[in-house]
Image (cartoon, grey):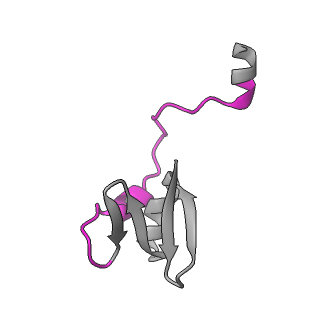
Amino acid sequence: MLIPVIYNNGNHDQVKGFMLPKLIANNGISMFKRSSGWVLIEVDEIRDMTKIARYSGEERRQEEFKIHELIDII
């Protein structure tokens, strides 16, 4: 999933979800867009992204299909 962001210099971009906590923790962006609208990093409430960005444990979420796996299914 791509998330719209606005960097501190005003440039617009879309980033993958896993990048968002790192960008927030490093003060790399000023805004990002949720389904409810734009979130201003310095103003709106957000989760403590530093804890999420520093997580170094094993990835337990389900992996997305890889292209070769999809080809095998077909």
Nearer to us in this view, 45 or 62: 45
Nearer to us in this view, 63 or 56: 63
Nearer to us in this view, 12 or 61: 12
Residue plotted at (55% across, 32% down): 63
Residue plotted at (49% across, 39% down): 59
Q: How many marks?
A: 0
Range of magenta residues: 42-69
| Percent coordinates x, y for residue 46 in the rendering | 28, 64
Q: Mainly helix, strand or loop, the magenta region? A: loop
Image quarter where the C terminus lies is top right
Residue plotted at (30% across, 63% down): 48
| Percent coordinates x, y for residue 62 in the rendering | 49, 31
Nearer to us in this view, 36 or 63: 36
| Percent coordinates x, y for residue 50 in the rendering | 37, 64
| Percent coordinates x, y for residue 32 in the rendering | 42, 66
Which picture quadrant has residue 57?
Answer: top left
Residue lying furthest left in this view? 45
Residue 54 is inside the magenta segment: yes
Q: Is residue 26 above or below residue 20?
A: below
Residue 32 is inside the magenta segment: no
Which picture quadrant has residue 9?
Answer: bottom right
Residue plotted at (57% across, 78% down): 11
